[in-house]
Image: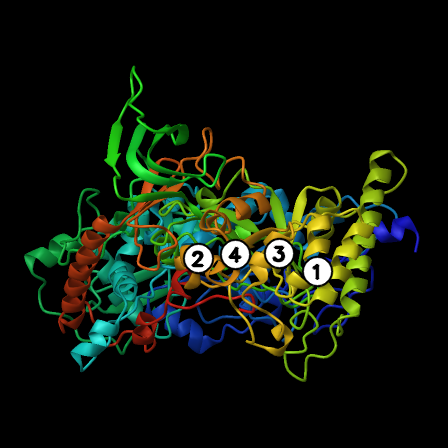
């Protein structure tokens, strides 16, 4: 194939070329079933008269009909709710472009199947759409990309359904990078991160779908309900008011309600929880009209606009007040089956019904009990000067273990290590002195292989190379795993993609700054990395008998696949060089190949899941063919057999301390491997690959003493200095040395003693865990939970008898951020 064909081929992550057919349709189309941006609701009209009647009965005269399949879903249409032909009802046949972060593909093994994959597809599709206007030479027509051009130019609004508050921020960030200002659909979880919400400058669509407290017979059943579920139940009716008070423009929606009639009751709840009647009315009239660019036709009772009216006997915000008539385009639709008129309203009801007074507020009948999550987290500011006196310092550096020693910290960095230190003269700012006599101080522990803080799937296993997906996109700042691991002295974790494919996704090294947002957790100085894998997982031998078609299917095929992909990356690199020199057409930006080029250039380090010595050797040789130095071999259970070769290559070996015989592939694994490789000159660390084990990395280090007779000081390096060196962050962390970040843990006894307890954990001079303060936190949460349970058991509290049928099930639905709490995440999750 000539260079032109390579550079301007079809829209594959692999950079391959081919003729595409629209999935499920005849004719041209995109490469993925989940990219349906050329779908148009107007072409598949199914807004039947009975459905329109339901909307009229709730007083709605116009609705946006939204597509519901795929990630890029296509364009909606705005329709009136009257009885007429579609030709007369369609106010705007081509409305917003819709995007939803769903991993439900129309085909079982089609990309994407993870949240990070969905975000990657969002990003790559927008890049492809941009390129479709720039390509020269061999042209291709793709209607799914053409449909996105009005979004990129700002002519069409983009509506995003992110599904969580973290993804609201992330998708907004990605859209903004392309000059797009999207509209977001609220998930009801926005209360978790007020800081992220305040940083989003856009309009929100708020579904009025609230969970309903269940009826539980046994007290033990109530005690089993998680505090987080009770919090999100208590917060739900307040989200509209809270977003409005945050200065966000909100439109109210029936989206997700299985029973339309629950809408007005939920609306009443929202008003009782602080939403002003004026904001509620605007959220059903002027704001949605503005979102749909239809303010010139609807939204207000103004001469020249459509005669769309809702006639209520009483106050619309009182669910008992019957809606008598709905007018659509000047046509009257009476509702004869409404209830009889109510008795005369009370004085307080009359005040609540007055929506003309800008200062009127609904009577507060309930005060929220649920607290913000950040109230349980430490203030992210430490003392300007910190002096720790009298501790046994395990420096993990040239000074070794120092007894009765001191550590001086200023502005988050270590400035002195020694004995008999005193506070410096001059302005010290805020100052704290800790008496640590009888205690031990170590560098913050580092886990070189973790999946604990990944949201929405550890693996994107649908393709043999998913180098374009980014763990940094889905870092979960809200998981309690961060706090539990801080309680074990951990301060840094290398978040890795799983081991489902030979080339996995990009890693993210984080600091466990409990309370920071996802971007605030990232270790900014850490160089980029990526997960590779060998063995059973990548050739799908343990995936079931039906998984037999994806290449590679054998261990022999894995190195061939690496050669193919890096050869493709080199060709891609050459194509770009030719373009810059004016010798060829502009190549399409391919996020997978961009990542592989970074590896070739030495700007991204490989962390490779590996077990068997034969595969390890072949892998190192293939990488050396391309001039690539491997960052680390992960697990590396048979690494002790080829320790000299690993050391000669310069790869790190990050292994389990004592895992063996958990499957046949690791039949030769031994607990002496780490110590043996260390003795042969390999750079060795111990890792967890386990959300629970990560809480006890100090005891993992002790196993090097138990099995391998490694000196205690060297053993602690396995979870401090050596993983820092493997991740190329040892200039900042890994030891207690002058100039490094003040990341450390204070222990009740030797860190290798099975009876020791982590008392405090500090990161950059800020205390993120304190065992004594934790007792107060636990007691405070217990009081909060008891109060919430009592409120949920109250039969009179905000339980409309005709709420949507799934409202009780919604109560038990965990937020995406909390989906894996209490679970252990591994490579194969």
Q: Position of residue 771 (x, y in %)?
A: 25, 51
- Residue indicated by mark 3: 677
The numbered disc on residue 642 is 1
Q: Residue at x 77, y 53 (%)?
A: 623
Q: Residue furthest right?
A: 2
Reply above or below: 18 against 739: below
Mark 3–mark 1 Cα distance, whole angstroms, equals 8 Å
Mark 2–mark 3 Cα distance, whole angstroms, equals 16 Å
Q: Position of residue 103 (x, y in %)?
A: 55, 67
- Earlier-in-chain disc, 2 versus 3: 3
Element at label 2: helix
Neighbour class for label 3 at 10 Å: few (<14), some, many (≥20)? many
- Residue indicated by mark 4: 686
User: Residue 211's quadrant in the figure?
Assistant: bottom left
- Earlier-in-chain disc, 2 versus 4: 4
Mark 4–mark 1 Cα distance, whole angstroms, equals 18 Å
The numbered disc on residue 702 is 2
Q: Residue at x 46, y 29 (%)?
A: 739
Neighbour class for label 2 at 10 Å: few (<14), some, many (≥20)? many
Quarter occupied by the N terminus:
bottom right
**Near-viewer residue (181 or 751):** 751
Neighbour class for label 4 at 10 Å: few (<14), some, many (≥20)? many
Reply above or below: 453 against 542: above
From the image, state whether disc 4 or disc 1 is nearer to you.
Answer: 1
Q: Position of residue 404 (x, y in %)?
A: 31, 36
């Amino acid at each position: 194939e000539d260079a032109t064909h390579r550079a301007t081929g079809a829209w594959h992550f692999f950079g391959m070329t081919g003729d595409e057919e629209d999935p499920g349709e005849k004719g041209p189309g995109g490469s993925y079933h989940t990219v349906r941006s050329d779908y148009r609701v107007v072409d598949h009209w199914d807004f039947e008269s009975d459905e329109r009647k339901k909307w009229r009965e709730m007083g709605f005269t116009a609705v946006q009909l939204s597509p519901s399949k795929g990630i890029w879903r296509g364009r909606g249409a705005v329709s009136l709710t009257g009885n007429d032909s579609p030709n007369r009802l369609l106010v705007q046949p081509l409305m917003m472009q819709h995007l939803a972060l769903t991993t439900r593909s129309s085909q079982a093994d089609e990309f994407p199947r993870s949240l990070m994959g969905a975000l990657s597809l969002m990003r790559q599709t927008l890049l492809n759409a941009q390129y479709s206007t720039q390509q020269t030479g061999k042209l291709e027509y793709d209607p799914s990309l053409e449909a996105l051009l009005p979004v990129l130019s700002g002519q069409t609004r983009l509506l995003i359904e992110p599904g969580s508050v973290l993804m609201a921020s992330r998708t907004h960030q990605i859209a903004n990078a392309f000059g797009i200002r999207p509209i977001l659909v609220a998930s009801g979880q926005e209360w978790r991160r007020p800081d992220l919400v305040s940083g989003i400058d856009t309009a929100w669509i708020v579904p009025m779908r609230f969970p309903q407290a269940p009826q539980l017979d046994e007290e033990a059943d109530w005690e089993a309900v998680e505090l987080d579920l009770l919090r999100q139940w208590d917060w739900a009716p307040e989200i509209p008011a809270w977003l409005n008070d945050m200065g966000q423009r909100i439109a109210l929606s029936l989206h997700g309600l299985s029973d339309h009639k629950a809408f007005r009751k939920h609306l009443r709840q929202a008003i009782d929880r602080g939403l002003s009647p004026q904001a509620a009315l605007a959220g059903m009239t002027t704001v949605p009209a503005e979102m749909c660019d239809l303010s010139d036709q609807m939204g207000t009772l103004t001469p020249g606009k459509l005669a769309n009216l809702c006639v209520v006997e009483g106050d619309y915000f009182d669910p008992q007040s019957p809606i008598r008539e709905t007018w659509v385009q000047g046509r009257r639709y009476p509702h004869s089956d409404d209830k009889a008129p109510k008795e005369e309203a009370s004085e307080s009801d009359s005040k609540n019904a007055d929506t003309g007074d800008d200062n009127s507020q609904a009577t507060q009948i309930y005060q929220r009990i649920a607290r913000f999550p950040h109230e349980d987290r430490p203030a992210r500011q430490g003392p300007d000067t910190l002096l720790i006196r009298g501790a046994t310092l395990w420096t993990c550096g040239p000074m070794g273990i120092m007894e009765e020693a001191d550590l001086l910290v200023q502005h988050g960095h270590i400035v002195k290590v020694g004995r008999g230190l005193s506070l410096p003269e001059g302005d010290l700012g805020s100052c704290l002195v800790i008496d640590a006599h009888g205690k031990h101080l170590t560098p913050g522990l580092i886990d070189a292989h973790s999946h604990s803080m990944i949201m929405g799937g550890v693996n994107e296993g649908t393709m043999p190379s998913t180098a374009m997906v980014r763990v940094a996109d889905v870092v979960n700042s809200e998981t309690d795993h961060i706090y539990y691991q801080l309680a074990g002295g951990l301060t840094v974790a290398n978040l890795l993609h799983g081991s489902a494919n030979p080339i996995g996704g990009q890693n993210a090294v984080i600091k466990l700054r409990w309370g920071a947002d996802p971007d605030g957790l990232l270790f900014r100085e850490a160089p980029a990395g990526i997960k590779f894998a060998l063995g059973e997982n990548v050739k799908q031998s343990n995936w079931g008998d039906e998984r037999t078609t994806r290449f590679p299917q054998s261990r022999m095929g894995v190195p061939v696949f690496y050669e193919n992909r890096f050869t493709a990356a080199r060709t891609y690199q050459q194509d770009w060089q030719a373009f810059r020199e004016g010798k060829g057409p502009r190549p399409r930006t391919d996020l997978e190949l961009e990542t592989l080029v970074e590896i070739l250039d030495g700007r991204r380090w490989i962390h490779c899941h590996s077990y068997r010595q034969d595969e390890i050797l072949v892998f190192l040789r293939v990488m050396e063919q391309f001039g690539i130095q491997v960052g680390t071999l992960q697990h590396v259970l048979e690494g002790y057999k080829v320790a000299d070769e690993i050391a000669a290559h310069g790869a790190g070996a990050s292994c389990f301390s004592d895992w063996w015989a958990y499957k046949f592939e690791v039949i030769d694994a031994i607990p002496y491997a780490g110590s043996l490789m260390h003795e042969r000159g390999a750079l060795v660390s111990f890792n967890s690959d386990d959300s629970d084990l990560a809480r006890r990395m100090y005891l993992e280090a002790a196993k090097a003493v138990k099995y391998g007779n490694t000196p205690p000081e060297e053993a602690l390096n396995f979870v401090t200095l050596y993983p820092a060196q493997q991740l190329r962050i040892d200039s900042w962390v890994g030891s207690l040395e002058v100039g490094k970040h003040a990341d450390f843990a204070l222990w009740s006894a030797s860190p290798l003693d099975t009876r020791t307890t982590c008392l405090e954990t500090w990161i950059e001079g800020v205390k993120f865990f304190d065992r004594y303060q934790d007792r107060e936190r636990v007691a405070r949460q217990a009081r909060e939970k008891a109060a919430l349970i009592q409120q949920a058991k109250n039969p009179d509290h905000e339980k409309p008898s005709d709420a949507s049928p799934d409202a009780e099930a919604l109560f038990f639905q965990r937020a995406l951020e909390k989906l894996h709490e209490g679970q252990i995440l591994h490579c194969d999750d």
